[in-house]
Amino acid sequence: MSTVLEIGPGPGIFKALVGHLGVSVETVDIDPDLKPDHVASATSLPFVDNSYDCVCAFQMLEHLPYDQALQAFLEMSRVAGSHVVISLPDAKKKWIYSLHIPKVGQKVIHISRPRLKPVPHVFDGEHYWEINKQGYPLQKVTNDFSAHAKLLKTYRVDEQPYHRFFVFEKIHK
């Protein structure tokens, strides 16, 4: 059985869905009102190294200042046995087109909306930063997070292109 630690479980949707697949999911959050399995800070996880097969955080790290988000990712990498999966908001606008090609099927293409310069980020009480806003280009975020784990892939899903996913493999030292 796989074991997963989810940082910042929100309403518990991930744990409920993945639990039906036979995966053991535990949650951690600093807010006890969310009823996580463990109440703790993401920047100082109370677990030994390699405690879980996979550690994930979906749309959570941007709620921390960037340096703290990197510290939380470092902790996630420490606690993970093999993989870390995160999603972050990507502010780069995409035009999404779906077309049906005979004998090929449905194809979806993404066209980046051109911008002369990145949009400045204004703290809204929730997000301290977002990918592709001023000061946080995708390449910088990718490089900074990849210093702690090997990036296997990054992608956006057609149904919700604001969410950019990253799949990392732990670097065993």
Image (cartoon, rainbow, N blue to C red):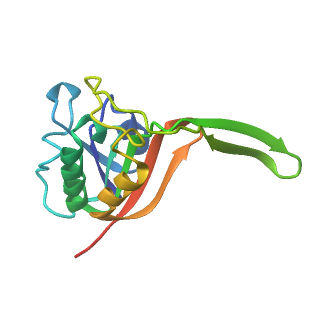
Residue at 44% over, 48% down: 165
Residue at 42% over, 50% down: 138
Would you say 22 lies left or right of 101 here? Answer: left
Which residue reaches farthest right? 102
Would you say 135 lies left or right of 73 here? Answer: right
Quadrant location, the N terminus: bottom left
> How many discs appear?
0
Residue at 64% over, 43% down: 110
- Residue 32 horizontal/vertical position (percent): 15, 29
Quadrant location, the C terminus: bottom left
Would you say 62 lies left or right of 87 here? Answer: left
Quadrant of the rendered image containing residue 120:
top left
Quadrant of the rendered image containing residue 38:
top left
- Residue 71 horizontal/vertical position (percent): 18, 51
Would you say 103 lies left or right of 6 here? Answer: right
Which residue reaches farthest bottom? 173
Quadrant of the rendered image containing residue 81:
bottom left
Residue at 10% over, 51% down: 46
Which residue reaches farthest front? 116
The answer to whether any part of residue 103 appears in the image is yes
Closer to us: 32 or 141 = 141
- Residue 4 horizontal/vertical position (percent): 31, 52
The answer to whether any part of residue 21 appears in the image is no
